[in-house]
Amino acid sequence: MIERTNLLIGGEWEEPATGDTFEVRSPHDQEVVAVVPKAAPADADLALERARTALGGPWATTSPKERAELIRQLSAALQGRSQEIAATVTAEMGSPAKFALFGQVFAATSVLDGYAEVLESFSFEETRNGIISPVLVQKVPVGVAAGIVPWNVPLVISSFKLGAALAAGATIVLKPSPEAPVSSFLLADALIELGLPPGVVSILPGDADLGRHLVSHPFVDKVSFTGSSAAGRIVGATCGELLKRCTLELGGKSAGIILDDADLTTTVPQLLDAGLQNNGQVCAAQTRILVPRSRHAEIVDAMADHIRSLVVGDPSAPDTDVGPLVAGRQRDRVEGYIAAGLDEGARLVVGGRRPSGLDAGHYVEPTLFDDVDNRSRIAREEIFGPVLSVIPYADDDEAVALANDSDFGLSGSVWTTDTDRGVAVAGRIRTGTCAVSSGIVVDPKSPFGGFKASGIGREMGPEGLAAFLETRTVVLPPG
Ligand code: NAD
């Protein structure tokens, strides 16, 4: 069992303001995995005070080159702890070991490396010809940021925010979630070794109340929130009222469109993996599978066969494909959607129950529904579990219309043997990201974010760095 007693506040280990703790239990067998401090508002106040002071200290004079180097060192320090981080995330939230090394660790370090690379060629100042006189247009740090993080890929989302803040020369207080706070202490260990100037980074695992405290705190200039669309609306409303800069990365209901020329031997395993990875708990999961009527039965059969071959069980076992859901309430939610799918007349092809022999954990079988109506709840709402819906279509136009008929707009994919055709279809999808014949739907050096209810703003790439900067114009003397 892991035990931690101190919090990373402004780059130092500090005793928490209260003795409150999170007891984290394994979603596989309910054993206690860790006890870690739960941060209180007083801890946040101290962290924000230090973060604000740091903006006027040595951190303010670091060069982009120095900051890029620090980000690369942090990435290397996390890579050096890969196995420990992967095992910790698996233990705290049930991410299968098969996925965790790539999806929980490499994804995080490649996001940091991506920010370092973007930073090295980013222009922080340019001279322009104004109408009356020349001007300098400068990019300056946004100030103090609050980064609010969900439990599904905790260090990846932390890296989205931390990488941008370090690249920009801003300071940041990260708030990991109550479900997956443990791995954030390994990130804190790596940050301590880095020797950042005091005040630049704090990590405060806490609940939604602490999140609200951070969002409304007068010392916070920018909120970078990742989580559900429901919570994102509340965070966005507070930021609007207080005129804080705000990035919202929210839920999704992405469509994987299989075109009629797709090669099923490569498409089916990759697309199903893009829907079921991390036990279906991925914001960009491809959960609506649009299939051409001309190949409907063939595709559904191939998918059902593949799903039946998946190993469901202990996430720490090396051959496990699908592990447990993060918590009992998440399983209740997923089972509620399975019941809704049956009620609404979808055809259950495979799964739908709790797997036998795994009663101690929060397990649900990987589940495939066919003949799903795109207007039904299982096609419209984010389930966040291993439940996929097949929706048949007649032609490419109908596929595009169905994909776009969603309240969300985060991600998507198009599967075809003709890349030009795939790119043309991808260009008609109203989502922040769309992949062609690939289940890798996020690129660590490229902007990621949502249209519609999937969020506002972008993370990663130059756009993600710009979201942690303010733009200032210095008007020079005329002539
Ligand atoms: P959640 O909205 O319940 O919580 C997310 C984080 O916000 C947690 O740290 C939580 O404590 C905090 N929080 C909750 N309410 C808050 C409030 N009113 N003010 C401030 N902070 C608050 O989401 P979750 O269950 O932890 O995560 C799953 C959700 O996250 C899914 O909807 C998923 O799609 C989304 N997600 C989105 C992305 C993305 O990049 N778009 C990535 C991962 C997860």
Image: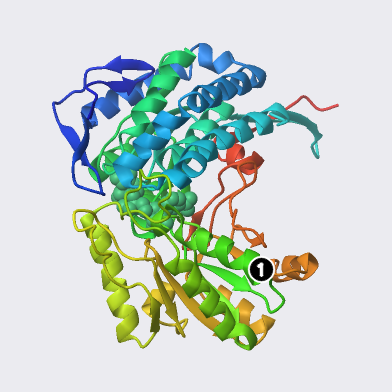
User: Which residue is located at x 33 percent, y 54 percent?
Assistant: 313
From the viewer's perspective, is residue 475 above or below residue 364? above
Q: Is residue 33 left or right of residue 133?
A: left
* Image coordinates for residue 126, horizontal then vertical, percent: 76, 30
Q: Amino acid at mark 1?
A: Trp
Is 456 or 187 nearer to us in this picture? 187
Question: Residue 281 at what x, y percent from top left?
Answer: 40, 56
Taking the spot 31% from the left edge, 33% from the top edge, the residue there is: 182
Q: Residue 397 sits in which quadrant?
A: bottom right
**Residue 212 visible, this orientation:** yes
In this picture, residue 368 sits left or right of residue 478: left
Residue visible at 51% across and 54% down?
456
Residue 393 spot, x, y in % from top left: 59, 85
Residues 465 and 404: in front is 404
Secondary structure at numbered mark 1? strand
Q: Which residue is mark 1?
A: 415
